[in-house]
Amino acid sequence: MIFGKGNISKDYEGRCGNCHTLFDDDEDEYCRYCGTKRGEGDFLPYENFNACVYGPPPEERVHICGECGFSWTTIRMLDRSAYCPKCGSRLKQ
């Protein structure tokens, strides 16, 4: 495979139908990155590739939804969580 080139995919098993991101947990009802409900979205073909990112070491972050009180932990270099995976509410920064 050529760097930066991936395969065009329509495989949405465990992925958001809008932004294509993998759900972290099988029980997540909403995408924590774009807020789309599991099973909904445009389901357009997407380029499926892995990227190697250099940067700060992964950090553990605890998130708590201000609407439903659900809490979850992420361990990522860059955490783009913006929505609650349980109720879909936008997270307050």
Image (cartoon, rainbow, N blue to C red):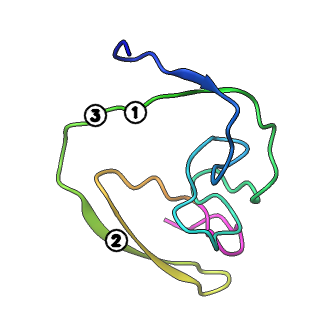
Q: CA distance from mark 2 to mark 3?
A: 21 Å
Q: Which residue does the image show at 29% across and 70% down from the upper left?
A: 60
x, y percentage for residue 61? 34, 71
Q: Which residue does the image show at 64% across and 50% down from the upper left?
A: 34
* Type of the residue with mark 2: Arg
Q: In the rendered picture of this protein, how many numbered marks are placed on residues?
A: 3
* Residue that carries the numbered disc 3 in the rendered image: 52
Foreground label between 2 and 3: 3
Residue 35 in magenta?
A: no
Label located before the other in sequence (2 or 1): 1
Q: Which residue does the image show at 57% across and 46% down from the upper left?
A: 21
Residue 4 placement: quadrant: top left
Whether residue 78 sits left or right of residue 72 in the image: it is: left
Over which residues does the magenta segment extend?
A: 83-93
Number of other residues with Cα within 10 Å of mark 1, as a class: few under 14, some 14 to 19, many 20 or more: few
* Residue that carries the numbered disc 2 in the rendered image: 61
Residue 82 placement: quadrant: bottom right
x, y percentage for residue 41? 80, 44
Main secondary-structure element of the magenta-colored stretch: loop
Looking at the figure, which quarter contains the N terminus?
Answer: top left
Whether residue 1 sits left or right of residue 45 in the image: it is: left
Q: Does the CB distance between marks 1 and 3 fall below 8 Å?
A: yes
Q: Is residue 9 above or below residue 38?
A: above
Q: CA distance from mark 1 to mark 3?
A: 7 Å
**Of the numbered discs in the image, which one, if any, rests on residue 50?**
1
Helix, strand or loop at label 1? It is loop
